[in-house]
């Protein structure tokens, strides 16, 4: 895992190298200071060295302290740049991988989980990396040098470390072995909390309309309490570390004072040496505490890193491995040959079963069927948002796998059931369809989609800021802008997935008329609940439980198909009522 993540330090390796180099300088200077302090006490004060000797050594201590401080500050600066750069690279790789996912890959990870991995998990590994390149160098060097200096002062007294250090190693090993699964569970609770918050904020209008605020508060409390309990369970184990370390520090100091005091009395050790030894105890114990803290952070980041790599290592199940880079989509013809599909390859039942359908370039095809009949799934196979499980799907006379994914999707414009707009102006949203579209082209597409008039009614027209997700627009307005955006692609195939459900029948009729006069040889596939939206189509496909029940014109289906006739009759009666 570490090797996989370390490659994201590229571009910041010089900072990752400078941080430990400068920290070594800090440690060397810091370890030398107690030696000077011992000389001041033993030679300057007790040995009669005089005020000049004390001032000289004192000045050396000050200069060493300033130099050590400078090295420490530089190391912190280098580590921060390296850590933030590393985190930025990991976050970019994670986000980029999500962009390469098919719908099937995205279905594997919840949106809330991906948000947690992009934020909380990346921040965790980023902070750990920043600490590791400093503390994992500083602490071992500090430990070794302080031990050597302590032994130099008095080898007998240094035996106290042989008793205390194994105790600390045992405590640390115990914490590490138990903490990892607890932190992994804690991050899972972060996912659940994010899911609750995200769902509530997206649907806040529905929550208020149905007076469900108290219910949502209860849901949030449940997720929040679960996160708190998981965090407490993980941290309860980790906090053992600090008191254990502190206890060992005090045991060492008391032992050193007890035995060292005896050595001073008998004359085998000087007072300054004992004072320096105590300082080294503090340095040794602090270095061990920092090492233990790093190990705890590594345990936490291991859980976070595992979750990050789950996404990065996920192989997109739709790729260009069989694609011909020179191939382009010649026309909008579509052919399905015994197509079967299921979301889970281990599922027993197909969502789409043995679908065969031929659509000529430039035809208008309507698709109708009950809820759950797999209408949306059928059209999502065309731009390879999902891949067929069995059978063949051809566009422009070639298998869809023969095209590069971007080439195929550039030739297909799809207006999804959920009308998604982004923060920014209306014009910026429309240019998702064509980044180079002129104002005239934008207005032309909006006129066909019956959006131009309401856009012009806004004070800022096409420069109106939509807010996040187009919160300033009605459902019907969003649908018309999404249609206009799709038209700007100038596609070979246009797919409208129930994309006029929120507009009135008169506007729907005007949009259909605009398609008829403007789309030319563009193949148009319309999924609709209203028969009136597809009655003009060259042919209509009736889907039932993932299978084609019938194909024909409006008149033919009214005469021969019971499902279509039933839908038409119920809608006619409803309109009369």
Image (cartoon, rainbow, N blue to C red):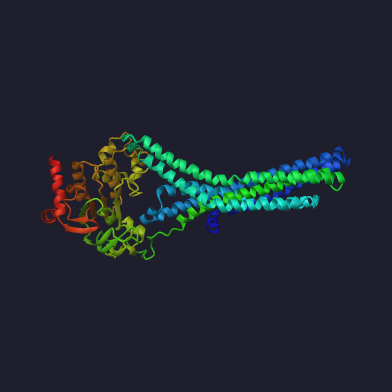
Q: Is residue 31 left or right of residue 207?
A: right
Along the horizontal axis of the image, is 567 left or right of 124?
left
How many numbered badges does the structure rendering display?
0
Above or below residue 517? Residue 452 is above
495 up-or-down from 402: above or below: above
Quarter of the image holding residue 56?
A: top right
Q: Is residue 185 left or right of residue 252?
A: left
Furthest toward the right, the residue is 48
Q: Nearer the viewer, residue 369 or 436?
A: 369
Q: Nearer the viewer, residue 330 or 265?
A: 265
Can residue 82 be seen here? The reply is no
Q: Nearer the viewer, residue 250 or 479?
A: 250
x%, y% of residue 516? 19, 50
| Position of the C terminus by quadrant | top left
Q: Nearer the viewer, residue 408 or 503?
A: 503
Q: Position of residue 97 (x, y in %)?
A: 44, 55
Residue 130 locus on image (x, y percent): 58, 49
Q: Residue at x 27, y 59 (%)?
A: 352
- In-image side of 47 versus 96 (left or right): right
Q: How far across and down, in percent of the image, does residue 148 sit?
A: 76, 53
Report whether residue 545 is seen.
yes
């Amino acid at each position: 895992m570490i090797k996989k993540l370390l490659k994201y330090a590229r571009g910041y390796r010089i900072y990752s190298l400078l941080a430990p180099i400068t920290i070594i300088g800090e440690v060397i200077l810091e370890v030398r200071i107690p030696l000077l302090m011992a000389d001041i006490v033993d030679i300057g004060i007790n040995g009669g060295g005089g005020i000049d000797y004390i001032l000289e050594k004192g000045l050396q201590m000050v200069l060493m302290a300033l130099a050590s401080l400078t090295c420490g500050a530089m190391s912190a600066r280098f580590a921060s740049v390296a850590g933030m750069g590393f985190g930025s690279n990991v976050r970019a790789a994670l986000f980029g991988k999500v962009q390469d996912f098919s719908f099937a890959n995205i279905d594997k990870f919840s949106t809330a989980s991906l948000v947690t991995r992009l934020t909380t998990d990346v921040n965790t590994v980023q902070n750990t990396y920043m600490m590791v390149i400093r503390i994992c160098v500083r602490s071992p060097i500090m430990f070794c040098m302080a031990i050597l200096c302590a032994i130099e002062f008095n080898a007998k007294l240094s035996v106290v470390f042989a008793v205390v250090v194994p105790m600390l190693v045992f405590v640390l090993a115990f914490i590490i072995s138990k903490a990892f699964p607890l932190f992994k569970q804690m991050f899972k609770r972060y996912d659940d909390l994010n899911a609750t918050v995200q769902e509530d904020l997206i649907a806040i209008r529905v929550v208020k309309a149905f007076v469900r605020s108290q219910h949502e508060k209860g849901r949030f409390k449940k997720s929040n309490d679960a996160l708190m309990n998981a965090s407490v369970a993980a941290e309860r184990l980790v906090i053992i570390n600090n008191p254990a370390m502190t206890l060992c520090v005090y045991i060492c100091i008391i032992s050193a004072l007890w035995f060292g005091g005896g050595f001073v009395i008998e004359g085998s050790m000087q007072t300054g040496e004992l004072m320096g030894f105590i300082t080294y105890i503090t340095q040794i114990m602090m270095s061990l505490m920092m090492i233990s803290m790093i190990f705890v952070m590594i345990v936490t980041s291991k859980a976070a890193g595992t979750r990050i790599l789950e996404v990065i290592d996920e192989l997109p199940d739709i790729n260009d491995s069989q694609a011909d880079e020179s191939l382009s989509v010649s026309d909008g013809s579509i052919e399905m040959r015994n197509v079967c599909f299921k979301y889970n390859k281990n599922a027993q039942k197909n969502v789409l079963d043995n679908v065969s359908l031929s659509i000529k370039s430039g035809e208008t095809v309507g698709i109708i069927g009950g809820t759950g009949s797999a209408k949306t799934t059928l059209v999502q196979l065309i731009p390879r948002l999902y891949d067929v499980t069995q059978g063949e799907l051809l566009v422009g006379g070639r298998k869809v796998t023969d095209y590069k994914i971007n080439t195929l999707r550039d030739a297909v414009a799809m207006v999804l059931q959920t009308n998604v707009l982004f923060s920014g102006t209306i014009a910026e949203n429309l240019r998702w369809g064509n980044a180079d579209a002129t104002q005239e082209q934008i207005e032309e597409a909006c006129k066909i989609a019956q959006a131009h008039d309401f856009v012009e009614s806004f004070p800022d027209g096409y420069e109106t800021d939509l807010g996040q997700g187009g919160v300033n627009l009605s459902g019907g307005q969003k649908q018309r802008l999404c249609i206009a955006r799709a038209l700007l692609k100038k596609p070979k195939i246009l797919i409208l997935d129930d994309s006029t459900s929120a507009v009135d029948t008169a506007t729907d009729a005007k949009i259909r008329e605009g398609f008829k006069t403007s789309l030319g040889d563009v193949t148009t596939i319309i999924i609709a609940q209203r028969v009136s939206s597809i009655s003009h189509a060259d042919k209509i496909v009736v889907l039932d439980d993932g299978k084609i029940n019938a194909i024909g014109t409006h008149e033919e289906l009214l005469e021969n198909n019971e499902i279509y006739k039933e839908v038409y009759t119920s809608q006619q009666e409803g309109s009369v009522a």
